Every structure is written in C-alpha cells, then in structure tokens.
Image (cartoon, rainbow, N blue to C red):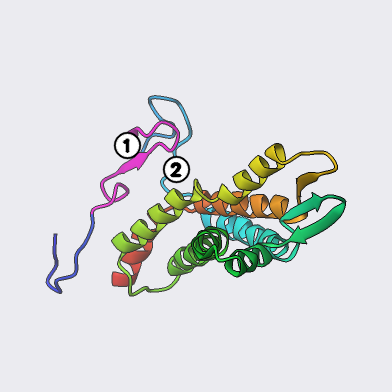
Amino acid sequence: MENAGSARTYLTARDAGLVNCTTCGRVNPACEPACVRCCAALASRDTQSLQKVWAWWIAGIIAFVPANVYPMLKTATLGRESESTLLGGILELVHHGSIGIAFIVFFASIVIPASKFLAVAYLALSIGKSSRITAHRRHQIYEVVEFVGRWSMIDVFVVAILTALVQLGSAASIHPGIAAVSFALSVAFTMLSAQSFDARLIWDADKDHRT
C-alpha cells in the first residue's frame, strides 16, 4: 500500500502480530513464548545480531590478512622447494599466459572475499543509518552474500586435491601452507558473520527512517 507521500509501506510479521520460528519455519502468534510445532523459543528479533556480525566479521578480516601474505602452497620438486602466495600464484599464471585461469583465481580468491566483507559491513552499518538503497535491494544483497558463501571454499578444495594427488616422493610433492588454513578460517568466519545477521532488522530500520 502507498501513503500520501507515495512512499511504499510494508506490513511486517511483527506488525501483524506474528513471529517466525527460526528452527522449523512455522509462523506463530507473537504472544506465544515457544513454537507450537517444535517447542523452540520464539523471538521476533535477535537483539544481539549486530554484535555477533561484527565479532565474526573482525575475526574474518584478521584471518584474511595471513591468507594473502603467507604461502598457500609449498612445492618440492627434485629436492628444490618453492612457496607461492595467492597473488604470487596469480602473477605466475599471467606470466605463463594462463590469463583466463588467473582471472578465475583472482576473482574467487580476492574479489569475492573482499566483496563479501564490504557487503556484510554495509548491511550492518545500514541498520543504524539511512540508506539510499531500498530495503528490498538490501535483502537481495544479503541473499547474494548467502549464496556466494557456499562457493567460497574453492581455493581450499583445489589445494586439498593437489596435496592428495601430487605426492611422488622425492620427485615432486605439494603441501598446503599456512595461508590455506587462514583462508579456510576467513571464509568460515565470514559465513558465520552473514548467518548471524538478522535480515528482519532491515525492514525495521527502513520503517524507522521513513517515520
């Protein structure tokens, strides 16, 4: 529905006297203390959502730094050992002419993680401040972050596969570096940060800023 100022208003579950169970998904009356289906405790909003988001977000940033500074792979070939970081590996791929693969690695290893950090931070900050982006668009950003999260472990999977396959004794071997563990932790922390975000706060913030 629209008001006199042509600004769209939304009827939320809280306004309708309903609350959604985050365990089983059943919609219950707001007066119920527990879900009538699974008996889980009901809460219209997670009051500690933003604190959890920022805690996991900071942890993810801390883990992301060594993921890009320290070696991702340690390669031993005929007694000679070499180490490569994420950026070093990308530049080496470009040097050998594998620009397409280098772009994929750069996009999956640096662009996507950095974009997730920025998106989660923006969503958390937009709760306390007015935003030019509509609440619906911010929900779409949140859904994209949630969807991309499941594909963020591609680098770790590649390192694990290479480590398992390339074990030729003294001839050649590949071992994961400390950056692989840091990258996995960074991805996990970012996913937890996104999952801790209570997307219902977006509607509340949008309603507060329009009143």
The answer to if 56 sits in the magenta stretch is: no
Image quarter where the N terminus lies is bottom left
- Place of residue 14 in the rendered image (x, y in percent of width and height, measured from the top left): 32, 49
Going by the numbered disc 2, the residue's amino acid type is Ala
Label 1 is placed on what type of residue?
A: Pro
User: Is residue 201 toward the left or the right of residue 111 in the image?
Assistant: left
Disc 2 element: loop
Which disc, if any, is residue 29? 1
Query: In this figure, what is the number of numbered marks?
Result: 2
10 Å crowding of disc 1: few (<14), some (14-19), many (20+): some
In front here: 123 or 95?
A: 95
Q: Residue 31: image x %, image y %? A: 36, 38
Q: Quadrant of residue 203?
A: bottom left
x%, y% of residue 68? 68, 64
Q: Where is residue 187 in the image (x, y as percent from the top left)?
A: 60, 52
The stretch in magenta equals: 11-28
Q: Earlier in the sequence, mark 1 or mark 2?
A: 1
Q: Is mark 1 on a helix, strand or loop?
A: strand
180 lies left or right of 47? right
Residue picked out by circle 2: 43
